[in-house]
Amino acid sequence: MTVGGDTIRITRGRGGEVEVTGTIDAFARDILIRAGFLFLPALRGHWIRLPFDLGQGWENEHAACAADMLTAARYPVHLDPDLRPHPPGQEAPATPARPPAMTAQAPPSRPPRH
């Protein structure tokens, strides 16, 4: 768990990047790496963020997945509401949307061969 029970915060930064702040131990680091986060060297430790330019939908899914995994591991986590894949109050579709199936029709009758 985090030292002193610090909350791990997953937020969207000013530049639009999704980043993680807080005290991260080795297990939380492994969870974040599994969820797609990068650990880049910075002046004060590491900058933990998702890759750029993969779309907000992708970022939201990975940020929410990371928050769910960290919460399941009993880390205190704050996920910005705008990073949820589906806004609160809206349910996710139960199944992926797909076009309606075409109905099978009997083949046209052929004239008999002579």
Image (spheres, rainbow, N blue to C red):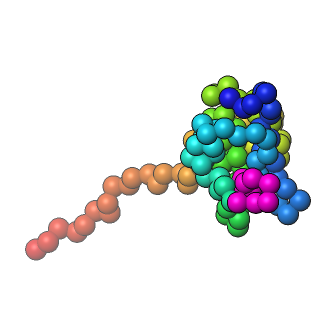
Relative placement, left or right, of 57 versus 35 is: right
The one nearer the camera, 38 or 72, is 38
- Residue at the left extreme, as displayed: 114
109 in the magenta segment: no
Give how far across and how far down residue 74 sits, in percent. Answer: 67, 25
Q: Residue at x 80, y 32 (%)?
A: 6
Q: Residue at x 65, y 56 (%)?
A: 38
Give how far across and how far down residue 92 sits, in percent. Answer: 68, 39
Question: Is residue 90 shown to the viewer in this render?
Answer: no
Give how far across and how far down residue 47 sits, in percent. Answer: 74, 56
Q: Residue at x 66, y 34 (%)?
A: 70
Q: Residue at x 63, y 43 (%)?
A: 29
User: In this figure, what is the number of numbered marks?
Assistant: 0
Question: Is residue 7 shown to the viewer in this render?
Answer: yes
Dominant SS of magenta comes to strand
Location of the C terminus by quadrant is bottom left
Q: Is residue 46 above or below residue 75?
A: below
Q: Which residues are magenta?
A: 41-50
49 in the magenta segment: yes
